[in-house]
Image (cartoon, grey):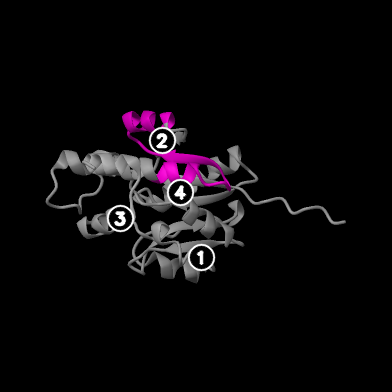
């Protein structure tokens, strides 16, 4: 009898801007509420990732030392961001750290603004992964999630990132994972997320 295949595990990397600088496109909201929402989105994203069965660990990357303490209390490993203004460089740096700490777990770059993310949707997308893969955002041109083995980890976030990931040989997964695709950038996105159901931190920040 052939040996059973060992199930693939993942380490989720979540880059987090200092909440005071996040969600500038939530116009019309007071600065302190935008800050609270940015922090809440990240904490709910992390919580969903940590509940996902295939996820061995969550590695958050942030320069906000106060928020880092909250993320550690939530169960994350947290490292400082040495290249704050370059998301892909940040992810490469974090990917190298993930390879050192969790060499058998595949790295997953996950956006921090997924307040309605469910562990079921993340699990279903990760179950489709077989080599470099990405999840297209709800708008169609962007990316919320990028996965690849350590040796092939080459994130290409930014303008038209879905096309860039395809051009680099990544395969699209998670097309039915609605909550994994809905990254919240503006108030219309937030309304859609609230209709789907958000995590406890975002609900609290919205006064629910």
Please give the residue where the numbered disc 4 appears in the rendered image.
91
- For the point 47% across and 56% down, the residue is 121
Q: What residue is shown with label 3?
A: 193
Which one is earlier in the sequence, the residue at label 4 or at label 2?
2
Crowding near pointer 1: few (<14 within 10 Å), some, many (20+)? many
Q: Is residue 83 above or below residue 166?
A: above
Please tell me whether residue 68 belongs to the stretch shown in magenta: yes
Q: Is residue 108 above or below residue 80?
A: below
In magenta segment, residue 178: no
Marks 1, 2: nearer the viewer: 1
Horizontal and vertical percent position of residue 136:
42, 65
Question: For the residues marked 3 and 4, what is the alpha-carbon distance in whole angstroms?
Answer: 26 Å
User: Can residue 93 be seen?
Assistant: no
Q: Nearer the viewer, residue 148 or 72?
A: 72
Residue 37, position as x, y percentages in the image? 25, 43
Q: How many numbered marks have been drawn onto this rendered protein structure?
A: 4
Q: Quadrant where the C terminus lies? A: top left
Disc assigned to residue 80 = 2
Provide the residue designation for mark 1. 173
For marks 4 and 1 on the same chain, the one whose residue lies earlier in the sequence: 4
Q: Residue at x 26, y 39 (%)?
A: 204
Mark positioned earlier in the residue sequence (1 or 2):
2
Q: Nearer the viewer, residue 160 or 50?
A: 50
């Amino acid at each position: 009898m052939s040996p059973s295949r060992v199930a693939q595990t993942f380490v989720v990397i979540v880059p987090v801007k200092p909440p005071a600088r996040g969600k500038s496109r939530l116009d019309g909201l007071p600065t302190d509420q935008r800050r609270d929402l940015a922090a809440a989105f990240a904490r709910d994203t992390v919580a969903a990732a940590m509940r996902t069965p295939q996820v061995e660990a969550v590695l958050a990357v942030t320069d906000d030392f106060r928020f880092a303490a909250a993320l550690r209390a939530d169960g994350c490993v947290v490292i400082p961001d040495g290249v704050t203004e370059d998301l892909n460089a940040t992810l490469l740096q974090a990917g190298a750290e993930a390879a050192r700490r969790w060499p058998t777990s595949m790295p997953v770059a996950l956006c921090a603004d997924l307040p309605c993310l469910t562990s079921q949707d993340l699990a279903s997308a990760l179950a489709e992964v077989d080599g470099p893969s990405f999840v297209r955002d709800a708008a169609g041109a962007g990316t919320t999630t990028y996965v690849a083995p350590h040796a092939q980890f080459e994130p290409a976030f930014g303008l038209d990132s879905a096309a860039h990931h395809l051009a680099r040989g990544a395969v699209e997964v998670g097309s039915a994972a609605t909550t994994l695709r809905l990254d919240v950038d503006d108030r219309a996105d937030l309304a859609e997320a609230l209709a789907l159901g958000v995590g406890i931190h975002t609900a609290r920040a919205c006064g629910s």
